[in-house]
Image (cartoon, coloured by chain):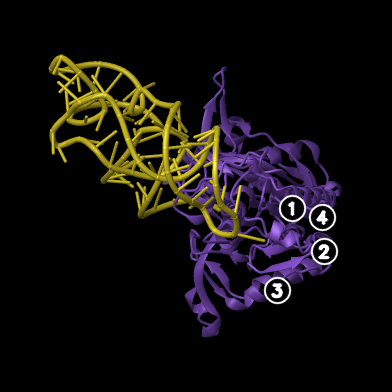
Amino acid sequence: MRMSRYFLPILKENPADAQIVSHRLMLRAGMIKQAASGIYSWLPMGFKVLRKLENIVHEEQVRAGHHPMLMPTLQSADLWRESGRYDDYGKEMLRITDRHGRDMLYGPTNEELITDIFRGAVNSYKDLPKTLYHIQWKFRDEVRPRFGVMRGREFLMKDGYNFDIDKPAAMHAYNRHLVSYLRTYERMGLQAIPMRADSGPIGGDDTHEFLVLADTGESEVFYDSNILDLTLGDRAVDYDDWDQCAGIMQEWTTPYARTDETHDDAKFMEVPEARRKVSRGIEVGQIFYFGTKYSESMNAKVVNSEGKQVPVHMGSHGIGVSRLIGAIIETSHDDNGIIWPEGVTPFGVGIINLKQGDDEADAACEALYKSATALGLDPIYDDRKERAGGKFATMDLIGIPWRITVGPRGLKNGVVELTSRKTGVSEEMPPEQALERLTEIYANV
RNA sequence: CGGGCUAUAGCGCAGUCUGGUAGCGCGUUCGUCUGGGGGACGAGAGGUCGUAGGUUCGAACCCUACUAGCCCGACCA
């Protein structure tokens, strides 16, 4: 992308309404614009990152054997009356009346809809297990939206639902989700810790929340620092292997890690003092096993191998996709702006032409831009007639992890400069070599 | 939902107390110089002062109502 043609309305000054760093940087980097309280338009660069996160979530869900689909944002109140949640959910649910006077709602979640879809189509244990999910906009009419996309009213969320014949099978689904979520967050450059949590209005027995450590997090968290050393890395996972998934589940849930809601001080004190950590965390996902809560109230039953009607065992699992952007920025930024992890960056490399209008510099940048594009590096080329300082500041603000700086001084020696946004370390090398290095870096992302 | 605050140019703000026809910085447009970390000088463009009503010869400013947004708390992914 040529910056001169892109829509990137960056702000030099801090917007007055933005309290936390991710909100401030998203506004300054021209990623979002507020449309109403807690509701945002996603401008091209913000949208690009959002789509990248969405893709990672999809890839990892499909890899785990789950089926993508799409349910509507608007739902009929009827199903919610059937489950009993129409009255229980409270004012957080945005209620709408259509022209015929029918009660509708903008979905805050989709348990009712998915159960309705499932019960009409599946009747036998032979059709189980199934896990369906979608990534869709939700609306919760928060009393007090704040912190930009971290706590908006409209938000993009992946929510998935598993249907299993009994509890052991449903627990495998639970474990499988935990593993797929760990992998998802790792690919995004995030360390998200599964913590025993409170089930809240969704209900259920078993639930873990995934928390990203950050000072601005909404929850207080208590954990054994040993958990920070765990990584999935590139180990091969067979999602059909119950024992392997249970083993990974064990591995991650053995060290103490809880939010304040479920914190047990006596147990926490058993952790050696040096490893006992108290911090704050941003919740970026949650998994639940809730047994037959919805299948019973909504009559989602199958015939088991003995010919008897039994309610299916269900679980639901969510990832706050739009809020993840906030979480990533909270954990990855400096005074100059965002620092995108390579896995989610809107552009692979930023090319800065220090002397726009200089024939040699222009030609070198053009060539570099074309090669980088052909290599799939998805470059953003700052070809504006700006001073060098302004170009550096913009590139730092929008957080592109790698920068190639092209100027007449280096070109005399046939070199450009490759700079890491994260470390600030620069190295001079011929343009082809810089592209090779970047190709290698992104091949491993 | 309780308590507090704000609304003036794209963004950040002053002007309101003490009423007299709207200003600063950034951005933006044009020109000249400059050219490796938000440069300098000069000349421009851009505002129903949130909305409606009231007081007044005259309202951004005083009064009333409404709307929107923000902060603290309770609540939440």
Q: Kindly report which numbered mark, 1 or 2, lies closer to the viewer in this rendering.
A: 2
Image coords of residue A439 (percent x, y): 82, 60
Callout 4–callout 1 Cβ contact below 8 Å? no
Number of marks drawn: 4
Figure chain in yellow: B
SS class of the residue under badge 3?
Answer: helix
Q: Kindly report which numbered mark, 2 or 3, lies closer to the viewer in this rendering.
A: 2
Real-space Cα distance between discs 4 and 1? 11 Å
Q: Kindly report which numbered mark, 4 or 3, lies closer to the viewer in this rendering.
A: 4
Callout 1–callout 2 Cβ contact below 8 Å? no
State which tag comes first along the sequence, 1 or 2: 1
Chain of residue at mark 1: A
Chain of residue at mark 3: A
Question: Is there any visible trace of residue A415 in the rendered image?
Answer: yes
State which tag comes first along the sequence, 2 or 3: 3
Left/right placement of residue A322 relative to residue A347 reads: left
Q: Which residue is denoted by mark 4 in the rendering? A: A63
